[in-house]
Image (cartoon, rainbow, N blue to C red):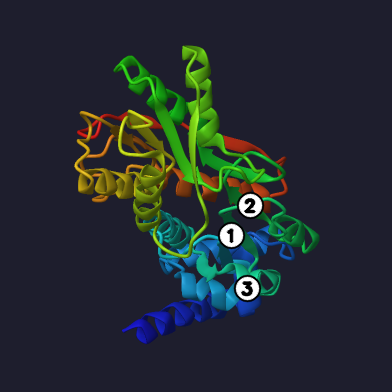
Amino acid sequence: MRESKQSAQTATIREIARRAQVSIASVSRALNGKPGLSEALREKILAISREVAYQPSAAARQLISGKMAVVGISLGRQDIELRPYYILLYQHLTVALHQQGMVPVFFNHQQTAELPARAGAAILLGEAPNDERPALLKSAAIPFVRIGEAGAGFSVSPDDRQGLYEMTHHLITQGRRRLAFMGGELEVPRPHSRLEGYRRALAEAGFAERLISLPHRLASDSLNSYRYLNRYLDQEGAQPLPFDALVCATDELALGCVAALEDRGIEVPVQVAVTGFDDLPTLATGLTTVRQDIAEIAETSMALLAEARAGEAPRHVSLPVTLVVRETS
């Protein structure tokens, strides 16, 4: 079925070329808005494409445009492809790219050096300190968009700081006084925007911060937080509890904490409130969290990528988030 559809698309391109009495390369230039054609010829080709109701598939676009139709989706050094957040984000990016007639190709971090040769543009996920990908792509003149903190080039992110500020403020207004923040590798010098939101709310209330920093592990965040919180509580002693709220950097971390506390007979949220961030479908059911609009992140990435391709001035877009209060607080 796929082969017949692709053949039909290719045949349609050939039909446009035959009717216009031009090469397939000229049809490609006209359909993709590339230079090298007179305006009269370009309009003639576009008019014929409308007559035959041409709808380019991603595969056909790659066929006529080569790597320029390919957008590489690149993960950072320590990111895990199977994390639910990245699966959901990748799905939305894939749909958005296909709607633009582009071909998404996944690149793990070990394939970073291959990206300029195989893709005409890129979307970077999971940026870390000393990330070499932006410099590599810039030197190869490959337009790209980062999903992450503001910095050099085009980027988009949820407003992490505001989201965690609102979450921490919510817990404080509930009467929580010993709020601990849990996140990965908090001691590593890099932007910790969610931690910054937590700190801002604590500073306004005059409360001391409590940090629980998890080491990086190639396993699920929920399993990591479950194991680490159990060890943390064993070291601290059973009573009194060192915190009355756990402000977690992700939903996955929060779910592991809820399981660890419940296994120890600690009531959530009576004794300890637990909150997350992301509002992942299914996983966040019952969890107080901060919702980010992953579909909007994908759509904004497409708009920024178009600007990057057009050579416009780089900018950062910060998307609003929403506090969602459920059973765990």
Residue in the foreground of this view, choosing between 256 and 286: 256
Disc 2 packing (10 Å; few <14; some 14–19; many ≥20): some
* Quarter containing the C terminus: top left
* Quarter containing the N terminus: bottom left
Amino acid, disc 3: Gln
For marks 1 and 2, give the CA distance: 7 Å
**Picture coordinates of residue 217 (x, y %)?**
49, 61
Q: Are marks 1 and 2 in contact (CB under 8 Å)?
A: yes
Q: Up-down: is 293 above or below 168?
A: below
Disc 1 packing (10 Å; few <14; some 14–19; many ≥20): many
Residue in the foreground of this view, choosing between 172 and 130: 172
Tell me the element at label 1: loop
Q: Tell me the residue that label 3 is attached to.
A: 111
| Mark with earlier residue (2, 3) | 3
Residue in the foreground of this view, choosing between 94 and 183: 183
- Residue at the image point whose x is 72% and y is 40% from the top: 313
Disc 3 packing (10 Å; few <14; some 14–19; many ≥20): few
Q: Up-down: is 67 above or below 199?
A: below
Q: Tell me the residue that label 1 is attached to.
A: 76
For marks 1 and 3, give the CA distance: 11 Å
**Picture coordinates of residue 228 (x, y %)?**
41, 51
Amino acid, disc 1: Gly
Residue 30 visible? The answer is yes
Q: Where on the picture, by quarter, is residue 182?
A: top left
Amino acid, disc 2: Ala
Q: Tell me the residue that label 2 is attached to.
A: 128
| Mark with earlier residue (1, 3) | 1
Tell me the element at label 3: helix
Tell me the element at label 2: loop
**Picture coordinates of residue 279 (x, y %)?**
32, 42
